[in-house]
Image: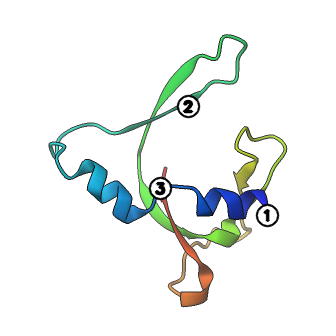
Amino acid sequence: MSEVTELMENTLTVGQLRDLIETIEDDTPVVIVCGYGDRGNTQQAIRIDDADMMVRGDFAPSAYSDSGVAMVEDEDGSGYDGEEDCNPVFVLQ
C-alpha cells in the first residue's frame, strides 16, 4: 500500500470531524499542532488561514515528510474541479 493510500484510508473524515466538534462553541479558535522536527520534539501550533478542496492526486510520497506524504504543487495552481473521479480531499491550510 502506498503512503498516500494509507494516509487517505486512515485519516479523519469530514463526517467524523463534524461529530467531534458539534458541541464546541462557534467562536473557538482552531490550530494545527505538529512536531517542529527538532531533537527536543517541540510541538508547534500553526494557525489555519483557509480550507479548500483538493484532489488525492495533489499528494505524493515524500522522504522529506514525517508522514511520508507531501502536497504536490501543480504548474497552473488549479485544485479540485468537481469531477467525481478525482477523489476529493478537504484540506485545512
Q: For this view, does 91 lie left or right of residue 10?
A: left
Amino acid type, residue under disc 1 in the picture = Met
Q: Name the residue under label 2.
A: 34
Where is residue 49? Give x, y as percent.
41, 46
Query: Callout 1: 10 Å neighbours few (<14), some, many (20+)?
Result: few
Q: Mark 3 points at which residue?
A: 12
Asked if marks 3 and 2 touch (Cβ < 8 Å), the reply is: no
84 vs 81, nearest the viewer: 84
Which of the two labelled residues, at mark 3 and mark 2, occupies the earlier sequence position? 3
67 vs 46, nearest the viewer: 67
Element at label 2: strand
Q: For this view, does 31 lie left or right of residue 4?
A: left
In the figure, 65 relative to 37: above or below? below
Q: Mark 1 points at which residue?
A: 1
Examine the rendering and report whether any part of residue 73 can be seen: no
Amino acid type, residue under disc 2 in the picture = Cys
Image quadrant holding the N terminus, namely bottom right
- What's the distance in space between the residues labelled 3 and 2, CA to CA? 16 Å
Which of the two labelled residues, at mark 1 and mark 2, occupies the earlier sequence position? 1
